[in-house]
Amino acid sequence: MKHIYKTNAFVGYVSHSIYQLNTLRVAVLAVVLTICTTLSAQFTIMVTGVPMNTPNNAQIFLSGNFNSWSPASSSHVLTNLGGGKYMITINPAPGQVEFKFTRGSWATVEGNLGGLTQPSHKVFYNGQPKTVEVVILSWPDLMGGGTGLGPTNGSVNVLNESYFIPQLNRTRRIWMYLPPDYGINPGKRYPVLYMQDGQNLFDPTDSNDWMIDEAMDDLAQGGDPGCIIVGIDNGGAYITNEYSPWANPSLGGGEGKEYVEFIVNTLKPYIDNNYLTLSGRDYTGIMGSAMGGLISMYALIEYQDVFSKAGIFSPIFSFNGPKMAQHIASVGKLNDVRVFFLAGALEPSYITNGMEEVIDAMIMAGFDLSEVNISTPIDGDHSTWFWAREYPKAYQWLFEYDQAAVSSHEAAIETLQISAFPNPATTWVQLKGDDLDQNMMVQIIGMDGRVWYNSFQLGTQTIWTGDLPRGAFSLSVTDMQGRTRAIQLIHE
């Protein structure tokens, strides 16, 4: 019996040992599986396109909520795969992953297609292997934004340092002011005011600063719904040519028609396709002083279907003699307008005399006095301080009936459900979506404003992209119903 007992005890001991061994094996296996799962559960980010002006030797860093938003973490440098493609793999904690790309500092952070601040990319990560594809649309610091331009307000940036003007075959710096609440409510859209002499509008280091950004921010605090301001630098040596529609025999001029065509046919479509604008004429204004007032008045009369309001400060209509008044008489009233005329009592008589002649021409052409506001402060002279002081009053009168919200009419017009394939593209691209069996206006516009493709064609027709350089573009499509769509197109 002892022998049998010992044997059973031994068997029991062996069985217990085997149980412990199996338990240990299960535990080890669980640890191994956990390690393998952790190693394989990675978050990969593929950058499939970068701006054309990305330096060849640039290092691109990933910054996010997983590395305390460090803009130059040595552990988060992307691998350059060539051809404008980069990759990085990280192991963040499950949850929402937020990130941006930099070239090593917050001064070199990525931007959107217009060169403005890019919101953080946000992706939900469930802990399982995941790959996302992202395109870096711009480097604002390489487009002129925030470099050497003085300490501008945070709502101001440079759209492009050298925006191409195809009508005149030259380039120009374009400024952008966005309201303080811009982008907070994606359904909210804003009227737009196009202003001349852009270099004098926003930069406090310039003695001629109009302080437009400060004025607009103050108005916003007082309840104004907001307005996008687009400032176009004057052309320096070209200013008299571009700001005058007709030639002056001794002083030059005569390129104003092409300059206004640039605003209407090139710049405005780009702004409407890439920003939260109310694109209709009721919400679009133009403003300028001196020669800028001359060309702004011409734009309003020539394109009454595009602009409904104008701020005309100290206009030099005498540069072209009676031609502005004659032009108003020739074109006539095509739509209701609002024009704020400003001239100080201390200005030269040719300023006030020319303004009165133009106002008389408007009345004779059928415009009503209610469409005109005439302001002649007794202390005003031909200077920037005067225009800056009077700007808020003019803006409020011009835009007092506008509401920065999307009406059902606007929303219907601006919705066109199409996409582009393939994207990224190489030699061709096609539109995908409904209602393509109709003629459409198709444009491909570079970030510098250059129009690479401009065709009125069937929506089903192939779009040639073989001559595009590598980088990001805006593919703009407008159908016969006026619906528009801007697609971010990447060319490899």
Image (spheres, grey):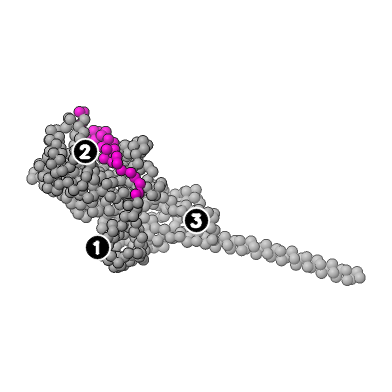
Is 65 colored magenta in this rendering? no
Quadrant assignment for the N terminus: bottom right
Left or right: where 310 falls relative to 93: left
At which x and y percent is residue 420? 35, 63
Q: Which of marks 1 and 3 is nearer the N terminus?
A: 3
At which x and y percent is residue 236? 20, 44
SS at mark 1 in the image: strand
**Image-quadrant location for residue 214:** top left
Quadrant assignment for the C terminus: bottom left
Mark number displayed over residue 370: 2
Q: Earlier in the sequence, mark 2 or mark 1?
A: 2
SS at mark 3 in the image: strand
Mark 2 or mark 3, which is nearer to you? 2
Mark 1 or mark 3, which is nearer to you? 1
Q: Is residue 244 above or below residue 214?
A: below
How many numbered tags mark residues here? 3
Region rendered in magenta:
378-407
Q: Residue at coordinates 24% horizontally, 63% vertically from top-left?
A: 456
Q: Is residue 331 visible?
A: yes
Is 388 colored magenta in this rendering? yes
